[in-house]
Amino acid sequence: MNFILDNIFIVAIAVISGGALLWPALGPRGKRVTPLQATQMINRGKSLVLDVRTAEEYAASHLRDAKHIPLADLGKRIGELEKSKNRTVIVVCQTGARADKAARLLAAAGFEDAHALEGGQAAWIAAGLPVTK
């Protein structure tokens, strides 16, 4: 106990830095799917692939038949997806972080079956799955 009192600043720094490391893991996450699960959903039909990357990233390569709406524009363009509310939506970004945010935004807008692609486009390519340019 004396050690803690004598080194209160070091202990405080350790606790704060540990909390900062855990914060992202404790935050709310939306539904996620692996590239294999996404492939199965796409093959079953009745699914929409939504790419939320920038225009430059999308132009470099993207999943076939993906609808492109950058994450920055998703809030004001969500109406374009209204007819797909009853379909499964697979959200894709480069690494999965933006897709997770977009999937939560879609869920808040009433899309019950919105999933983020875990690992994003990078994981899709690493799995050897096809992309188009």
Image (cartoon, grey):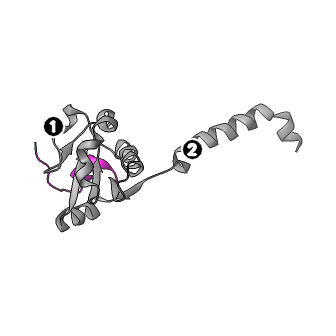
Q: Is residue 13 above or below residue 120?
A: above
Quarter of the image for residue 46 reads bottom left
Q: Residues within 10 Å of mark 1 (few under 14, many from 20)?
A: few
Q: Quadrant of the C terminus?
A: top left
Report the amino acid beneath label 1.
Ala
Provide the residue designation for mark 2.
Answer: 23
Say above or below: 111 vs 11.
below
On screen, residue 20 above or below 124: above
Magenta segment boundaries in residue numbering? 117-133
Dividing the picture into quarters, in which one does residue 58 lie? Answer: top left
Left or right of 128? Residue 4 is right
| Secondary element at image label 2 | helix
The tally of labels here is 2
Residue at horizontal 28 percent and vertical 60 percent from the top: 86
* In this rendering, position of residue 19 left or right of residue 128: right
Q: Which mark is residue 60?
A: 1
Q: Amino acid at mark 2?
A: Trp
Question: For the residue carrying disc 2, how many other residues have a C-alpha within 10 Å: few (<14), some (14-19), or many (20+)?
Answer: few
Q: Farthest residue toward the left?
A: 133
